[in-house]
Image (cartoon, rainbow, N blue to C red):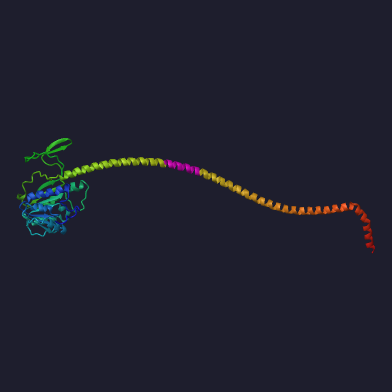
Amino acid sequence: MSPTPSFTGERFLPECSGEIWYEHWHRYALARQLSQDCTVLDVACGEGYGAAMVAETAYKVVGVDLSVDTVQHAKNNYRHHANLQFVSASCECLPFSDASFDFAISFETIEHIEKQKEFISELMRVLRPDGVLILSSPNKRLYSDAHDYHNEFHVRELYRHELEELLHDPFPHIYWLGQKLLFHSAIWPENQACATAEYLVSHDQQVTVSSHFSVEPMYYIAVCSRNPAMLPTTLNKLSLFSDSVEMVYQDYARQTKRVMELDQLLKDRECLIAERDGFLSLRTQQMAERENLIAERDALLDIRTEQLNEHTELLSERTAHLSVCTEQLNERTEEIIKLNALLVLRNEQISEHERLNVALNQQIDYRASLVWWLKSPLRFITRAIKGNS
């Protein structure tokens, strides 16, 4: 066994699950019934699971795919089928002789091809004149248009009339089948074969019995041949496909559980959002109060600034007045210093006068005394003598 290729969306792998698994396996199960004991060509066989399924009832099966790695994987995985081989080649240029196969399979291939007409011509070439082609193609109107969906691996999808125009000339006889995964309630006779089938449809609470499916196919399956006698006569039946473990139902249950979990997460998220909104509201209120406090503070700051400016102006005036007073004080100080100097000088003069007054008073007192008067005649005589001499 070789490692399974990674699923990219271009090629289906049997490990995939869900709707795509049912769609692909159901188509190959149908081809397996129609190609018993035939030489079969499976074009764009991919991983090889379908070719291996068909090889269980066919005479010989050849699977063709463009990918060398995918073909090698198929050879390694399904080599136990002696009547099965795989070839790497382009589906637009098949490496086989004319009229080599009884039955050709082309499932989900044509939408990947640009030269679709040439591809159909190649299929017609390698098929025997009474050979049968079973081909499937997505219904572009429902597959893409209705869901606004684009498959990056699809080159050219087809509407039904386009597919019919493409197939009609090489294969004038076509039996059309529709395929779609549907949700139904099934009621059947337990452990007995079903004699007939009925299709009950509910619309606007009215149940009607229908002879055919009223839903539009997601895929068209065309069973084609150049010989109308070679078209299978068992195609006018309802074919249902299921699996023993009911994979899609389990997937549905898992998805339902997941949805319920997501709903609970959504409710929890809404609670958290409500709490967050409450916190945001409180925060908004706090911010509003803070803005009011800031506004009040700014108003007080403006008042304080005005008062400070007034005080500054008053201080400037007082400083100027103080400067003037200081100058006047300095002038007065200088005058006082000068006056002090004059006062000192005057005090010295007064002291000198007082000394002279004391001396004069002493002289007066002396002259007023008897001694002076007694000495006075002698002094006059002495002066007179000195004067005569």
Horizontal and vertical percent for residue 373? 92, 53
- Which of 311 and 362 lies nearest the eye of the viewer? 362
Whether 138 is among the magenta residues is no
Horizontal and vertical percent for residue 148? 22, 47
Indicate the quadrant containing the C terminus: top left, top right, bottom left or bottom right. Answer: bottom right
Q: Is residue 180 left or right of residue 330?
A: left
Residue at image position (23%, 42%) is 259
Residue at image position (20%, 47%) is 145
Q: Is residue 179 left or right of residue 320?
A: left
- Which of 74 and 345 lies nearest the eye of the viewer? 345
Q: What's drawn in magenta, residue-wise?
A: 288-301
Q: Is residue 243 left or right of residue 354?
A: left
The main secondary structure of the magenta stretch is helix
Residue at image position (14%, 36%) is 207
Whether 294 is among the magenta residues is yes
Q: Count how many numbered circles sit on residues in the image.
A: 0
Which quadrant of the structure image shows residue 99? bottom left
Horizontal and vertical percent for residue 203? 17, 37
Horizontal and vertical percent for residue 33? 7, 49
- Which of 37 and 117 lies nearest the eye of the viewer? 37
Would you say residue 169 is visible in this rendering? no
Indicate the quadrant containing the N terminus: top left, top right, bottom left or bottom right. Answer: bottom left
Which residue is at the far top? 206
Which quadrant of the structure image shows residue 216? top left
- Which of 228 and 58 lies nearest the eye of the viewer? 58
Would you say residue 267 is visible in this rendering? yes
Which residue is at the far front? 371
